[in-house]
Every structure is written in C-alpha cells, then in structure tokens.
Amino acid sequence: MPFFFFDSTMLLLIPAILLSLYAQHKVKSAYRKFSEIGNSAGISGAQTAAEILRRNGIYDVDIEEVPGTLSDHYDPAARKVRLSSENYHGRSIAAMSIAAHEVGHAIQHNTGYAPLSWRHAILPVANLGSTLAFPLLLAGMIFSFKSLIDIGILFFAGAVLFQMVTLPVEFNASSRALRQINDIGLVPRSEVSLAKKVLNAAALTYVAAAAVAVLELVRLLILRNASE
C-alpha cells in the first residue's frame, strides 16, 4: 500500500491546507490593521472585558495578562479571561474585539451554553487522541495489525469531534461579543462593523482547522480500507 504519510490520498488535504494558509494570513492581516486603529472610547481590552462582565452581572471571573501574541483565551476551569499583553493594554479596535470575544465565552459559561460544556468535556479525549492516534495508526500499518489502525482512527475521531464542537462555540462567542459591544454602547455602530471584520477573520481559522481535521479523517479511513 502507499507510504502512510505521503501518498495519493494527500491530495484530499490540499483544499483545506490552502484554506488554512489563507485563514492564517487573513487573521494576521486583520489583526495588524485593526491594532493600529484606536477605538473611539479609548478603552483597553482589559477595560472592555471588565465592563462587559460587570454589565452581565459576572463577578467571579478574573482578567489576566498573559505573554504571547494572540494567546487570548477563556479558561472555564479557572474562570479567567486571559488576554495577551498587546490586547490587555491596547486601546485598538482589535484589542476591544478580542477581549469582548473572550468574555463571550465567560457569558456562555455563566448561562450554561451546552456546546461550551461539551467542548470542555471532550478536551482530554481530544488531547489524548492527538497524541496517540498517529503512532497507533503507523504501528498498525507497519505490522498489519488492523485493530491498532481502528483504535488510532477512533482516537483521531475524538480530536475531529473537538474541532467540530469548537465551531458553534467560537461563532456564538463572536456573536455575543458584537451584541455586547453594540448594546452597551461602548463604541459607535461604525466601529462595531470593524470589530466584526476582526472576529470574522479569526473565525475562519476555526473553519479551516475543522476542514483539515475532517478531510484527514476521511483520508485515514481510505487508507484503512486500502490495507484490507
């Protein structure tokens, strides 16, 4: 059978890989552009997050500064909104948008948004699947041990499921972020539309990641059947 890591089935991944490269370019370009445009309220990402949390009556979520670029995230276990230094202190459209998005996750958590709970529950399985799937698949194919191949595919399917559940979680967080920015009146409507451009660019990266994962799973199933 074809070599496991490089064979004709790799052609399946090309569209998703190209989309992924485009998404990375898009988010970096949008972030760079809107990081240079200040929001009219003159508030930092940390202040944006704090105001949205306050307006939603959420007082048990802390806001922390973390190192790195675009390392922003919400930790549901620690109940912390973590913002990269540039977005924590920055007073740009990008900083405000990303901070609002991460608080969107905190609001999801506070309201019991089911997909967020599912993603958090699936995370350990997804991490295990990402670590073990390919060693098991490779060993199964080298030694013609089909049970190992099936277990490897099952592990990888867990990682794919995580990517799929991530999509509604991220899109919903962005929707909540834009609604909060608009309803609270942090900035004029014209700036809400700019914030939407930042968040749409970021959302494309999740779509691309899901596409790569799904097509990789299809590829593995084709290889499995070819090994029979």
Image: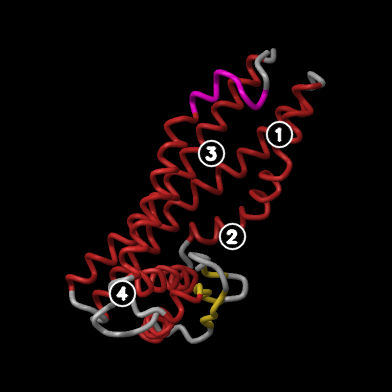
**Residue highlighted by disc 4:** 180
Q: Is residue 7 magenta?
A: yes
Q: Amino acid at mark 4?
A: Gln
Return the disc, 3 or 1, that comes first in the chain's sequence: 1
Quadrant in which residue 15 is drawn: top left
**Mark 2 or 1, closer to the camera:** 1
Return the disc, 4 or 2, that comes first in the chain's sequence: 2
| Left or right of residue 185: residue 108 | right
Query: x, y percentage for residue 83?
Result: 50, 74
Q: Residues within 10 Å of mark 2 (few under 14, many from 20)?
A: some
Q: Residues within 10 Å of mark 3 (few under 14, many from 20)?
A: many
Distance from Cα at disc 4 to Cα at disc 2 = 24 Å
Q: Nearer the viewer, residue 23 or 60?
A: 23
Query: x, y percentage for residue 68?
Result: 55, 68
Q: Quadrant of the C terminus?
A: top right
What residue is at 66 percent from the left and 44 percent from the top?
Answer: 130
What residue is at 78 percent from the left and 22 percent from the top?
Answer: 142
Q: Nearer the viewer, residue 105 or 32?
A: 32
Return the disc, 3 or 2, that comes first in the chain's sequence: 2
- Residue 213 shows which numbered tag? 3
Q: Is residue 148 magenta?
A: no
Return the disc, 3 or 4, that comes first in the chain's sequence: 4
Distance from Cα at disc 2 to Cα at disc 1 = 22 Å
- Tag 2's secondary structure? helix
Q: Amino acid at mark 3?
A: Ala
**Residue highlighted by disc 2:** 120
- The magenta span reads 4-12
| Proximity of marks 4 and 1: CB atoms separated by less than 8 Å | no
- Residue 152 shows which numbered tag? 1
Return the disc, 2 or 1, that comes first in the chain's sequence: 2
